């Protein structure tokens, strides 16, 4: 084994590099990407006549107890799901209901990231934020394409 110069950092292993990469990604998602899905949801909700709930990701902080954040996320999700515009078209109605459902999961995951200590559950919460935000974007796109298609047919 070759030694390194005392003035330089020791060589990193593959696992350290991968671990650091995941940490950077997770921190970027929480720091920069965490607000984008909520803002997109808020824009979508306002376009459908709904206002974003009090647990908007931008409003979440440790000033609010965990239980209150979870309760607010549930109420906001339930209200948005109950108010989702139903058309009788299964594709539209599925997406219209799932968008607030996924946003509720994101809001709950963010509460876990603020308060949770279990590394497995925190990692799961990070994955929920990323994956469900991308699924919301897909559903919003599909709803937009359906609206465009209906407008062009009339």
Image (tube, rainbow, N blue to C red):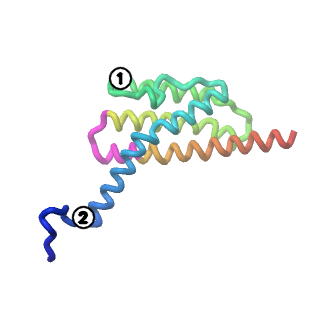
State which quadrant residue 149 falls in: top right
Q: Which mark is residue 12?
A: 2
Does 78 appear in magenta?
Answer: no
Q: Residue at x 46, y 46 (%)?
A: 130
Q: Is residue 130 left or right of residue 140?
A: left
Compute the Cα span from label 1 to label 2. 40 Å
- Decide: is 85 above or below 141: above
Q: Main secondary structure of the magenta part?
A: helix
**Closer-to-camera residue (109/148):** 148
Question: Which secondary structure, mark 1?
Answer: loop
**Closer-to-camera residue (85/111):** 111
In the rendering, at what x and y percent does residue 1 appear? Answer: 14, 77
Question: Which secondary structure, mark 2?
Answer: loop
Q: Is residue 11 left or right of residue 104?
A: left
In the rendering, at what x and y percent does residue 128 appear? Answer: 44, 44
Q: Residue at x 49, y 24 (%)?
A: 75
| Local crowd size for mark 2, using a 10 Å CA cut-off: few (<14), some (14–19), many (≥20) | few
Q: Which mark is residue 64?
A: 1
In the rendering, at what x and y percent does residue 106 appear? Answer: 46, 38
Which range of residues does the magenta coloring cover?
Answer: 115-126
Does 124 appear in magenta?
Answer: yes
Q: Earlier in the sequence, mark 1 or mark 2?
A: 2
Q: Is residue 111 left or right of residue 51?
A: left
**Closer-to-camera residue (129/10):** 10
In the rendering, at what x and y percent does residue 48 appear? Answer: 67, 29
């Amino acid at each position: 084994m070759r030694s390194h110069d005392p003035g330089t950092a020791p060589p990193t292993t593959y696992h350290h590099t991968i671990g650091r990469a995941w940490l950077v990604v997770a921190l970027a998602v929480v720091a920069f990407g965490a607000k984008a899905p909520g803002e997109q949801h808020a824009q979508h909700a306002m376009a459908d006549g709904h206002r974003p709930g009090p647990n908007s990701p931008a409003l979440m902080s440790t000033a609010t107890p965990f239980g209150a954040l979870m309760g607010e996320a549930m109420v906001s999700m339930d209200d948005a799901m109950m108010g989702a515009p139903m058309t009788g078209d299964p594709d539209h109605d599925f997406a219209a209901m799932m968008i607030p459902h996924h946003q509720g999961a994101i809001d709950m995951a963010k509460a876990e990231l603020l308060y949770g200590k279990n590394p497995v559950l925190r990692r799961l919460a990070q994955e929920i934020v990323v994956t469900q935000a991308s699924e919301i974007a897909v559903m919003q796109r599909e709803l937009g394409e359906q609206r465009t298609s209906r407008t062009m047919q009339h």
